[in-house]
Amino acid sequence: MDLPGPPTQVLASVGTAAPAGYPSRVCLITLSGGLFALDLRSVREVFPVESITPVPGMPSVLSGVTNLRGVVVPLVDVRALLGLSTGGTPPKFGVVIHHGANQVGVLVDQVPEIRTVQQDQFLPAPQTGEAAAQPFVSTILRIEDRLGGLLEVPTLLAHMDSAGSRAGNT
């Protein structure tokens, strides 16, 4: 699969520059048992999902909306986009991600954890297979004995916008 370039450089929490092109702090999430990471700068908050209100006519990736302290937040289930199983126990938590003025809640299996990561924990993503297979995964992250994909929030949100536009035109 052809993947977009690495995420933008961020500053480490100790005030030194992070290694070229990789985040220094990530939010680790679990989707269908698989490990994924989000650049912590793109994460607003984590919350338990108490209810989801379906929205007719929206793309299938949009599970619905929820009320988060008086704010309506769209909830997306990205498992199908990543080629993961959508069966089994429904996700119980949401992670609000943002890029610019766009924000959505991504449904996740478990309460995420925050980690500081080093450049040597990032591995090149495979460059084989269908070009559009996982355009949201920019690189592979090694955390202890686990491997996970680093999700590109701007690419994911752009996909949500284009899917919403297509659904609105049908």
Image (tube, rainbow, N blue to C red):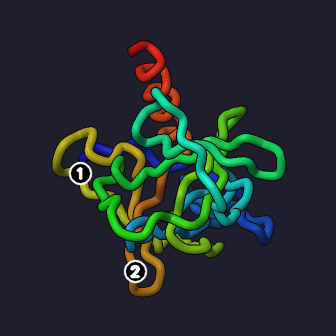
Residue toward you, 14 or 96: 96
Question: How would you rate the neighbour count of disc 1 (Cα within 10 Å): few for under 14, some for 14-19, many for 20 or more?
Answer: few
Which residue lies at the image location 78% right of the left edge and 71% below the top edge?
14
Q: Residue furthest top?
A: 169
Tell me: 74 left or right of 60.
Answer: right
Question: How would you rate the neighbour count of disc 2 (Cα within 10 Å): few for under 14, some for 14-19, many for 20 or more?
Answer: few
Q: Amino acid at mark 1?
A: Gln
Task: Determine whether the residue tagged by mark 2 lies in a helix, strand or loop.
Answer: strand
Residue 127, numbered label? 1
Tell me: 98 left or right of 88.
Answer: right
Tell me: 126 left or right of 113.
Answer: left
Residue receiving disc 2: 146
Residue 149, numbered label? none
Which residue lies at the image location 43% right of the left edge and 51% below the top edge?
78
Query: Could you tell me residue 9's position as x and y percent?
Result: 62, 51
* In the rendered image, the vertical position of residue 158 relative to residue 42, given as above or below: above
Query: Could you tell me residue 77's position as x and y percent?
Result: 46, 51
Query: Could you tell me residue 158's position as x and y percent?
Result: 51, 32
Task: Determine whether the residue tagged by mark 1 lies in a helix, strand or loop.
Answer: loop
* In the rendered image, the vertical position of residue 29 relative to residue 102, given as above or below: below
Give the alpha-carbon distance from disc 2 to disc 1, as whole Å: 20 Å
Query: Could you tell me residue 83's position as x and y percent?
Result: 28, 54
Quadrant location of the C terminus?
top left
Q: Amino acid at mark 2?
A: Arg
Which residue lies at the image location 73% right of the left edge and 54% below the top edge?
44
